[in-house]
Amino acid sequence: MGRNSRALLRLAAALVLGPLLSGLALSRGAGALTEWRTLVFPYLWLYLFIEGRVRRQALNDGQVFLLGAAFSFVYEGLLTKRMQDSFAVSGLDWVAVLGGPLEWGMTVVVWLHCLQALLPRDEEPASCPGGGLLVAGIPALVGVVYLWKSVFGHFRVEHFLGPMWLIDDLALAAGAYWLWRRYRRSLEEPAYHNPVWVWVFVGLGLWFLGSGLLAEACLAVESPKVLAYTLETFWLAGLGIFLWVTWRDRRLVSDDPVRRSRPAVASAAFRVLGTLVLLKFFGATDDPRMAFWSGLLCDWPSKLLFYYAFLTSRVEV
């Protein structure tokens, strides 16, 4: 297989894996794989952008995680407004604000790592005709669309938040910029390691996920409050032990980047297989049960596997 054919095959695999790993296929079904606007942005653009960065300088999972986290504020915060869909005074959905960077950071790392396991990039990758134009032109076009919708009030949040939506947008843009700057500084470090705030961020994200699933399960079976509080306590204790073990083991592994990580590939498998199973039983729907079962079958096991690998070793992307 020639270099150009392999590059096209890798790109096609990326555009199929992206919606499956991100959960977009759960809400849109097979249509997520044919909706060209969504495939172009974010998936095609993200793939070309990060691949271009990797060609210039090797990146590890922590650095790619920072890129994915910064992107979440732009895509889910500024463009789709999923982080501003709350009835709170500020309009920000703080669970989404905390969970979005974790979700996109993990998704992008697992996405690229899975591609490396299935179709490793060539040592001398083929150039993508027009790739530079796409990387520069797509965000410019997206920016024009954002400005157009903002000026003429096409975003729904503008109607019920009033001027607060602009303050929220500025805050989310500042978060994206801060993460981008942190990524840029990481490139100057000889061996980038996840700082303490990433550990705190991961702990909060996992706690929100597990607590939400337990609360939904207890409400579904109408369990006594004592049982619900007991389960929440056990979950908090178990999560604390998990984080303590990973914190302890972070100094037991080699400082060299790891080219392959079985937990990272296994987390991708959980997400893809779980998504396919849920689509088989529920289809692409807004059924409330979908959120619970996707959390139980896809998010919970995949995140525990991924974050153990992510926090205890440097996985080369």
Image: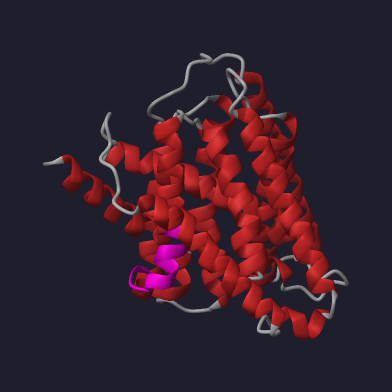
Q: Residue at x 71, y 84 (%)?
A: 153
Q: Position of residue 15 (x, y in %)?
A: 35, 58
In this picture, which residue range is highlighted in magenta? Answer: 32-43
Q: Position of residue 251 (x, y in %)?
A: 61, 15
The answer to whether residue 224 is magenta is: no
Residue at far right of view: 89
Q: Position of residue 281 (x, y in %)?
A: 38, 73
Query: Where 152 sits versus 56, above or below?
Result: below
Q: Nearer the viewer, residue 244 or 198?
A: 198
- How many labels were placed on the picture? 0
Q: Quadrant of the N terminus?
A: top left
Q: Residue at x 40, y 39 (%)?
A: 113
Q: Quadrant of the C terminus?
A: top left
Describe residue 78's horizontal placement relative to residue 259 as left or right: right
Residue at far left of view: 1
Query: Where 200 sits versus 26, above or below?
Result: above
Magenta residues, dominant SS class: helix
